[in-house]
Amino acid sequence: MNPTQFKRKKLKAERRSRDPYAPIKDEVKLVCKAAGMRYGDLTLNIRRSKKYPDSCTGHAWWTTWRVALTIGVKCDRAQIAAIVCHELAHILARGDGHGDKWKGTFVDLAFETYGARVKGDLGNQFGLHDQIIEAIREVLQQ
Ligand SMILES: [Zn+2]
């Protein structure tokens, strides 16, 4: 590594340590990698919420690859991972809403990225979302 490369690497590390969204971006990068999507192709908007500290919500626009995430300040990594899988599944399912194609994609992303397996009936979008949070949490605690 030459001095310029070293300086660049140091700068990048400093910038990252000041970025409060870095852990969330890391989760998006992980899921993108598993999905074969380029992180840089996404337009990502992240907000932290103190008003709803235990909840993670999001929205995805599959035509423009825009993802907006609102992450409660007390959310754990499994909740963040699940909302990222949920929203990227919307992009990959291309306008399926919370239909079967989206459900299958959501389940696949959770498995491909984290090795999290959903057992039994997928249920509706809310039930499935909760199941995936639990499945990811189980894997992360191992
Ligand atoms: Zn959704």
Image (spheres, grey):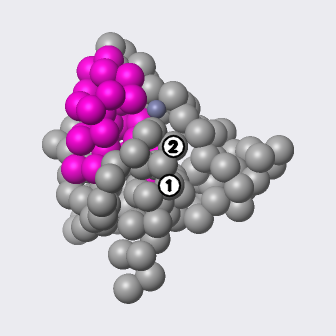
Extreme top residue here? 63
Say what amino acid the circle numbered 1 marks. Answer: Asp
Q: In the image, residue 6 lies at what x, y percent? A: 34, 65
Question: In the displayed structure, would residue 87 be above or below residue 137?
Answer: above
Along the line of sight, which residue is nearer the eye, 1 or 44? 44
Q: Does the magenta stretch include residue 38?
A: no
Please report the residue visible at 34 percent of the width from the left and 49 percent of the height from the top. 122
Q: Can residue 11 be seen in this view?
A: no
**Residue linked to disc 1:** 130
Q: In the image, residue 14 lies at what x, y percent? A: 54, 61
Question: In the displayed structure, would residue 95 be above or below residue 100?
Answer: above
Please report the residue visible at 44 percent of the width from the left and 26 percent of the height from the top. 60
Q: In the image, residue 72 lies at what x, y percent? A: 69, 50
Q: Quadrant of the N terminus?
A: bottom left
Q: Is the magenta stretch mostly helix, strand or loop?
A: helix
**Residue linked to disc 2:** 126
- Examine the image and state in which quarter residue 117 appears: bottom left
Say what amino acid the circle numbered 2 marks. Answer: Phe
Q: CA separation, marks 2 and 1?
A: 6 Å
Mark 2–mark 1 contact, CB under 8 Å?
yes
Please report the residue visible at 31 percent of the width from the left and 44 percent of the height from the top. 106
Question: In the displayed structure, would residue 99 be above or below residue 9?
Answer: above
Magenta-tinted stretch:
81-108
119 with respect to 52 (left or right): left
Please report the residue visible at 21 percent of the width from the left and 57 percent of the height from the top. 112
Q: In the image, residue 2 lies at what x, y percent? A: 25, 65
The disc at residue 100 is none
Along the line of sight, which residue is nearer the eye, 105 or 74? 105
